[in-house]
Amino acid sequence: MAKMLYVAWHEYQINVFKKSFIIVLLSVPLFFAITAGLAILLEGRHQELTALGYVDQAGILADPAPAPQEDAKARVEMIAFASQAQAQAALQEQQVQAYYLLPPDYLESGTVELVYRENPGSNAAGQFYDFLQINLMAGQPAKAARRAALGSNVIVYNLQPDGKLVLGGPTLGNILPLLTGMVLIGLLLTSSGFMMQAVFKEKENRVVEVLVTSLSAGEMVAGKVLGVVAISFTQLAIWSLFALLAILIGNNLFDMPWLQEAGLNGYGILSVAAIGLPAYVMTSALMFSLGLIVSTPQEGEQFGPLLFLVYLTPLYLLIPIGNNPTHPLAVTLSLLPFSGMLTVAFRSLFMSVPLWQVAASVATHTLAAGLTLWIAQRTFRLGMLRYGKGIRLGEILRRRAPQSLGGGRHG
Amino acid sequence: MNASNAIQISHISKSFGNTQAVQDISFEVHRGEIFGLLGPNGAGKTTSIRIALDIFKPDAGSVAILGGPMSEQKKDQIGYMPEERGLYQDLPLERCLVYLASLKGLSPDQARQRLAPLLERFDLQVHKQKKVKELSKGMQQKAQIISTILHQPELIIIDEPFAALDPINTRLVKELIQELSQGGTTLLMSTHQMNQVEELCDRILLIHQGRNLLYGELEEIRRRFSGHDVWVRTPGELPQMPGVEKMTAHNRAVKLSLAKEVAPQEVLKGLVEKGVVLQQFEIAVPSLDEIFIRVVQEGQADG
C-alpha cells in the first residue's frame, strides 16, 4: 500500500510541479479571462452615449414617448430633425453619432435608413428600436407598449417521466455537467497520454527493471493510475475554482445575465464526476498498457485521438439523444464504458438522469476499470522488457502466469 | 534447497523465439560471498540474472532466492543494478534516489539520511540537485550503485558495475564492494571484465553461449589451469632443460612450458644445479582471460 502511494505521489509531483503543467493549468482560465475581459472591454468601448437623430417622414413620432431604459445614465437622447439636411449637418458637427430616416412609406415597407460617420454604439441602436417599438404601440396601454418594446423572458420547462418539471433552457447551470464531462475527457486523455509516455521512457531507460524488482505489478499499475487521476482532479478542482470566481465576479461586478443564471446542477455534475472516476482509471490503465506495448512514443500518440473519438461517440448521436433523452439508445449509451460519461452529461441538459442509470453506469465503468487494470498488470509482466515487438491479445489473456518474452538485448 | 545459499539456480533454460539464451545453467551463490558471473557479451549473463530476479520465468529449471521463491517481501532485501541506465533521467539526482529507495521500503527521511554520506563518498554531493541526464556517464554509474545499496540489502546483484568508471572510481567501487562483503552482504557481480573479478570474487561461473563453462572457487580454478608454465629471469643464457617443452621470451623474462608430468620444483632444482643465476623464478598463474580462451578453444567445458 505504502509503495503504491509512493508511486502515485511520484507521478503526481513530477507532473504537477512541472513548469509546463503550471503554465497549462493557469493558461486555460487566463485564456477565458482574457477573452471575457476583451469582450467586456470591447462592449464597453462600443457603448456610445452621444445623442441619436431621426427624421420622421412617416409621421409616427410626432409626440414620442421615450424609450424604456432602466439605467438613466445609459440613456441615449433621441433628437428629432425636420429634414435630412438638418440631420446631416448635426452629424457633420458631431452633435449626433448617427441619424435614422423613417421614409414616408415606413409603415408599409418597414424600411429604416441609418446614416453615420462611424459605426454607432450597439446600445444606441438598441435604444432607437425600443423607442420606435414603443411609439408604434401608441394608443395601447403604457404597460403593454413597454412590454412589446422589451420583449418576453421565456423560461423553458421539461416535463419529466416522473411528472416533475425541470428547467429546460440552456442556462450555464444546465450546461455545467456537459462542460464537466467534456473537460474530464480532455483531461483524462491528456494526462493518461503523459503517463503513457512516462511508462515508455521507464521501459526505454530500464528503470522498469528496478521497479519490477522493488514492487508488485499491481502496486505499480495502481500507483500510476491513482497519480494520474489525482493530477486530473487537481486540474479540474483548480479550474472549477476559477469558474466559480468568474461566476461571482460576473454576478456582482458585471451585468452578465447568463452568469447570473448559473445555478449549479449539482446532481448532474456529481453524476458525471462519479462516472468520470472509474472512466479515468479505465483509460489510464489502457494508456499504461499502450506505453508498454508500443515501440515508439509516436506510435503511442496515435492512440490518443482514436480513444478521443470513441469517447465522443455520443456527440455523433446528439440529435436523437437530444430529441428523446429517455430513449433506450440514450439509456444504453449511458451505461456503456467510454460513452457513458458524455451521454449522461448531455442528457443532464434536458433532464435529471435517473439515479439507477447513474449507479449502473458507475458499476459498468468500475467493472471495465477493474478489467483494464488486470490487463495492465498482465501487459506489464509481458511487455516491460520487450523492445520493438508487439504483444498479441491472446498472450495477455492466456491463463498461465505471463512471462516476459524479451526480444531486446539478452546478455 | 540449501539455506546457506542466497541464490540457487538449478538447470535453467530460456529461449526467445529461435534464440537459446541460456541452456541448462546451474549455480549457487553462498551467503556472504562475492560471486562472479562471467562471460563475453551475449553469453546469457543478463538473462540468467533476470531469471534469478523473477523478471523472466525460465522455460525449464528452478530458482530459489534467499531461501525460496521470489516474493514481494524479499524484494526489499535485494538490490539490483541493471547494466547502464536504470535512473529517471529528468529527475534531480537526490529526488530520484530517494524515490527509488522509498520503493525499497525506506521512508524518504531515512533515505535522505543514508544518502548524504554516500553522495559525499562518491563525490556527488554537489551534483545532487542536478538532473540525472546532466551528469556524466561515470557519475550516473556511481549514482546507480548508490541506488542499489541505499536500502542496505542482504543480496546485491550488479550487472557490469565498472562500466563507464575511470580507474579512481573503479577503485572506489571495488572498496565499497569489499566493505559490503565484509559486512556480510552477498554480492553477485556480472561482468565481462575478468581482471576485476580476479581481484574481488570468491567463486565464479563462466558462461559462454548460454552454457556453463567453468564453475567453482576462483583459486581452485586458477590452480587447475596453472602449474605447467614458469617465469624465469636470468642475466645469462638459459640452458636446455629436460621436461621443458617450449621456451618463449617475453621482454627480459622467459616463459618455460613444462611437460605435464614435470613439477616446477624439478626444473628449479635443475637450473640451480647447472649454476644458472636466477633473478626470478615464478609459477605462471594464468589470468581468467587466458583460462577462458583456453577453455573455449580446447572445449574443456566442465558444466
Image (cartoon, rainbow, N blue to C red):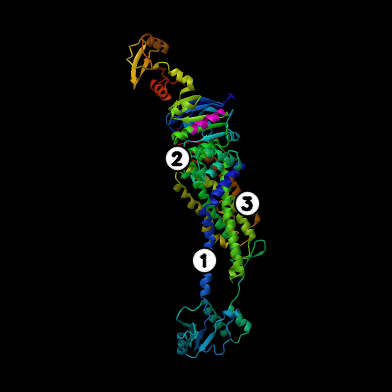
Q: Which mark is residue A360?
A: 3
Quarter containing the N terminus of chain A = top right
Compared with A233, A135 (above or below) is below
Question: Callout 3: helix, strand or loop?
Answer: helix
Q: Position of residue A6 (x, y in %)?
A: 59, 44
Residue carrying label 1: A35
Of B3 and A407, nearer the camera is B3
Q: CA distance from mark 3 to mark 2?
A: 54 Å
User: What amino acid is at disc 2?
Assistant: Lys
Residue B293 in view in this figure: yes
How crowded pointer 1 is (Cα within 10 Å; few <14, some 14-19, many 20+) is rated as: few
Compared with B239, A374 (above or below) is below
Labels 1 and 3: the sequence-earlier one: 1
Residue B65 in view in this figure: no
Residue carrying label 2: B137
Question: Callout 1: helix, strand or loop?
Answer: helix
Q: CA distance from mark 2 to mark 1?
A: 49 Å
What residue sits 51% from the left and 68% below the top? A38
User: What amino acid is at disc 1?
Assistant: Thr
- Mark 2 against mark 1, which lies toward the viewer? 2
Question: Callout 2: helix, strand or loop?
Answer: helix
Q: Position of residue B221 (x, y in %)?
A: 46, 20
User: What amino acid is at disc 3?
Assistant: Ala
Q: Which region shows up in magenta? A: B172-182
Compared with A357, A223 (above or below) is above
As for residue B131 lying within the magenta part, the answer is no
Of A404 and A240, nearer the camera is A240
How crowded pointer 3 is (Cα within 10 Å; few <14, some 14-19, many 20+) is rated as: some
Quarter containing the C terminus of chain A = top left
